Image (tube, grey):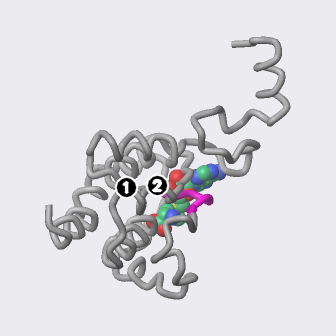
């Protein structure tokens, strides 16, 4: 796919149409409109050039309105898709938002989706203890994980 097609796909309104606002009041679900998300230039420019710089929407990434724009800027700067998504992270309490965000950022490509499964997680960000994004339970402390390894608790 050409870069312009990728951008069109990432910004498509089909992603928001997939989302049903069942928990809008409870979770404060108002997604940033695309014209506003595109104004993320005020961030440290290194984020858009250097794949070792990580970016996280930790207070509720929704369907990825802000993360998608970081991805697009990285791609426009010539970054490889894999490098570009590998250091993009998000957390949302709503499983539907997380599913859509993962599909969207990965464009449903299985190798990218695997990364998004680890990097975009469903959790209450006010209660996360483990911010490792390595597939381990976000609510477990390092000590819990240490003990489980020692005592083989499953
Ligand atoms: C105002 S929306 C913003 C979404 C996205 N950042 C954007 O700019 O479009 C807030 C998001 O936070 C999520 N959210 C609300 N409470 C949360 C919590 N405790 N932990 C994680 N996500 C939460 C909601 O599900 C919703 O998707």
Residue 28 visible in the picture: no
Q: Residue at x 32, y 47 (%)?
A: 103
Given residues 146 and 101, the one toward you in this image is 146
Q: Tags 2 and 1 in contact by the CB under 8 Å rule?
A: yes
Q: Which residue is mark 2?
A: 86
**Residue in the image at 57% along x and 64% along y:** 54
Q: Secondary structure at mark 2?
A: helix
Instruction: Find the magenta span and give its range.
Output: 55-61
Quadrant in the picture for the C terminus: top right
Q: Which residue is more in the foreground, 42 or 86? A: 86
Q: Is residue 74 above or below residue 119?
A: below
Q: Is residue 137 above or below residue 133?
A: above
Image location of residue 130, percent across then percent down: 72, 42
Q: Quadrant of the N terminus?
A: bottom left
Tell me which residue sits at (26%, 45%) in the image: 109
Image coords of residue 144 (percent x, y) = 81, 27
- Circle 2 residues within 10 Å: few <14, some 14–19, many ≥20: some
* Mark 2 to mark 1 CA distance (whole Å): 6 Å
Is residue 102 shown in magenta?
A: no
Disc 1 secondary structure class: helix
Residue 152 location, quadrant: top right
Q: Is residue 114 above or below residue 55?
A: above
Dividing the image into four quarters, tell me where ligand 1 lies. bottom right
The residue nearer to you, when weighing 154 against 101, is 154
For label 1, the residue is: 82
Indicate yes or no whether the magenta region holds residue 59. Answer: yes
Q: Residue at x 31, y 58 (%)?
A: 16
């Amino acid at each position: 796919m050409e870069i312009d097609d990728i951008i069109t796909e990432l910004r498509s309104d089909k992603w928001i149409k997939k989302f049903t606002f069942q928990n809008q009041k409870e979770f404060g679900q108002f997604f940033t409109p695309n014209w506003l998300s595109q104004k993320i230039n005020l961030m440290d420019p290194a984020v858009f050039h250097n794949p070792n710089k990580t970016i996280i929407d930790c207070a509720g990434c929704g369907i990825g309105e802000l993360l998608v724009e970081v991805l697009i800027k990285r791609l426009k700067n010539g970054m490889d898709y894999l490098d570009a998504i590998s250091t993009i992270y998000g957390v949302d309490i709503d499983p539907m938002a997380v599913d859509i965000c993962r599909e969207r950022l990965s464009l449903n490509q299985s190798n990218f989706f695997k990364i998004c499964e680890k990097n975009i997680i469903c959790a209450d960000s006010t209660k996360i203890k483990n911010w490792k994004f390595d597939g381990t339970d976000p609510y477990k402390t390092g000590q819990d994980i240490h003990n489980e390894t020692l005592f083989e608790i499953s």
